[in-house]
Image (cartoon, helix red, strand yellow):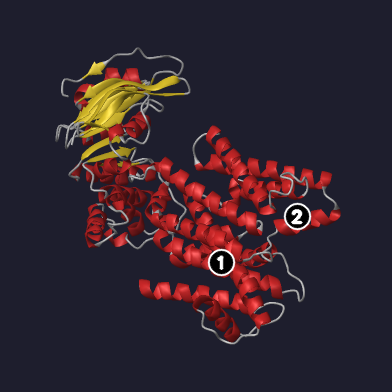
Amino acid sequence: MTLTASSLGRDAGGRAILDGIDLTVAPGERLGIVGPNGSGKSTLLRLLAGIARPSRGEVRLGGVPLQRLTRRDIARRLAFVEQQAETADRLTVRDAVELGRTPHLSALRPFGEADTRVVNAALERVDMASFAGRLWHTLSGGERQRTHLARALAQEPAILLLDEPTNHLDIRHQVALLALVRRLPVTAVMALHDLNHASAYCDRVLVLRGGRIAGLGAPAEVLTPATIRAVFGVEVTVHTDPGDGTRSLLVKGHIPFGETPEMTHVTGAAR
Amino acid sequence: MRPLAAVLLATGAILAALALGAAFGETAIPLGIVAKTAANHLFGAGFAVNPIDAGIVWDYRLARAVVAACCGVALALSGVVLQALLRNALADPYVLGISAGASTGAVTVAILGVGAGALSLSAGAFLGALMAFGIVALLARAAGSGAGAVILAGIAGSQLFNALTSFIVTRSANAEQARGIMFWLLGNLSGARWTDVALTLPVAATGALVCLLQVRALDAFTFGADSAASLGVPVRATQILLVSTAALMTAVMVSIVGSIGFVGLVIPHAARFLVGARHWRLVPVSAVMGAVFLVACDIASRVIVPGQVVPIGVVTALIGAPIFALILIRARRLT
């Protein structure tokens, strides 16, 4: 299922926090969204998920504008994992994952055997099956994030949107979670902070700056020292691992605050 | 527990509470006579019962117990709904300013004489409750989205209407009126009759049905409104439906029996402690516990001080606060 945004924009407090976003996410693709704080990453994800309404343009899911779909229709095709969604309720991991079945259930279609199987499969996917009976507040940050992911998978979506899924996780859990997302048989769009993670785990990268697209394409084409300097205000050098040829960025320093780096627009060839 | 057993247990608990509610009072009436009277009225059984006893049991105590039960259901479910939607453990039906508005409405009718006798105290309270809720809802909307805005708007609205009530009472009421209003504000079931049942029963039943049909949506709010939206719940429509249901249920109950505190706060917590946070269990269990708890408190209000009725709001708080404290301590130890 294809997810497209055309001339997408959103205003808040009288100014555009996101503008002129044209984007097509192909089925099975992993797209990373990077950009400095406040560049509009979360807003873009919320618009793509249909949780926030666009001020301009539209989002289409499988060719149909989101406005024409009910919330339930959207939720059966697309799942959204927010940044750090918390609860104070005494809830088990299984309870939390069962919530993912909500869009498939109704008064006439109660929770049944098939739903239990989907929930079990989702728990196993994220390695949380042995934690099913654990209470939410006893979980670590990584376990909570994996539970959220399992809840999203229980929706059986074609498309998964993730807002900084590695936030507050230690490095091992970050890598494990991204590797897990890469293995999932879904289209994934995720906002990421770490540019090397975006390079390593995404097919394409979208760079946002001030709510506009500053680059879109394969990581090696878009995440260049010039773009990174212009968008993030840091100096990086590119290194290639002599063993396996993987590319990584090394931060050397930052541009002093108060100076604006000149803006360059880089768009990769691959769409 | 199997569903059938649970339904039987719940029905049994409510019937037992009603029967005890009819039996206890200034003069104790044996349960056998209560059963016979009820059979006479419900099935035309034709048992020979002393007409005075029958009158007390049927016209006064049973009607009162049924109103108490309905009120317990309504307040407990309003608490469940608001705690889930506002994601705040301290939310109860009165955070929406409903009880404050009801008291302002009541004193406006009773002391200022607005309506010139055409409006009853209850009607005034109901209108006041709706007006306060309307103001709180508009204020919350203007203050922005989010659960915090509703609670802050509720506090502002409640303070405003409480101040208005105090202003009217101090300015215009004589000592007798002030005492009467005070008693009403703390909750008073002694005026409850079958005509009140005709209003409270359908309201409580409809409210319970709405809540039961929305248990999955209530669950979906566990991780917040955005999470509910991404799970396919039409957030705005669900919030409007459920908050209005809670507001209407509460407004009707407050207008008939006064503002009985603590039920809407304590019962959902107690129920959660027993059956967990999932709403398909929490909603029915809270409803039953609310009904039984309020009937029990009403019995207590009549027998604690011989020859005198203690306002039921005082009893719910006196019993409810220690239970609440116990739950808080136990819940912490279990985690």
Provide residue A63's location: percent of width, then percent of height: 20, 31
* Circle 2: residue type: Ile
Give the SS element for disc 2. helix
Near-viewer residue (A121 or B128): B128
Residue A224 in view of the camera: no
Provide residue B32's location: percent of width, then percent of height: 58, 86
Q: Mark 2 lies on which chain?
A: B
Provide residue A166's location: percent of width, then percent of height: 33, 41
**Extreme top residue here?**
A262
Q: Is residue A259 above or below residue B163?
A: above
- Would you say the residues marked 2 and 1 are in contact, meaning their CB atoms lie under 8 Å apart? no
Q: In this view, does B254 lie above or below A5?
A: below
* Residue at mark 2 to residue at mark 1: CA–CA distance: 23 Å
Taking A22 as reference, is B16 left or right? right
Give the SS element for disc 1. helix
Taking B317 as reference, is A124 left or right? left
Q: Residue at x 54, y 54 (%)?
A: B249
> Quadrant of the image for the N terminus of chain A?
top left
Q: Residue at x 68, y 49 (%)?
A: B119
Quarter-of-image position of residue B192: bottom right
Residue B252 in view of the camera: yes
Which dot marks residue B181?
2
- Which residue is identified by label 1? B69
Q: For the residue carrying disc 2, how many other residues have a C-alpha within 10 Å: few (<14), some (14-19), or many (20+)? A: many
Provide residue A201's location: percent of width, then percent of height: 22, 36
* Circle 1: residue type: Ala
Q: In this view, does A214 lie above or below B107?
A: above
Q: Which chain carries label 1?
A: B
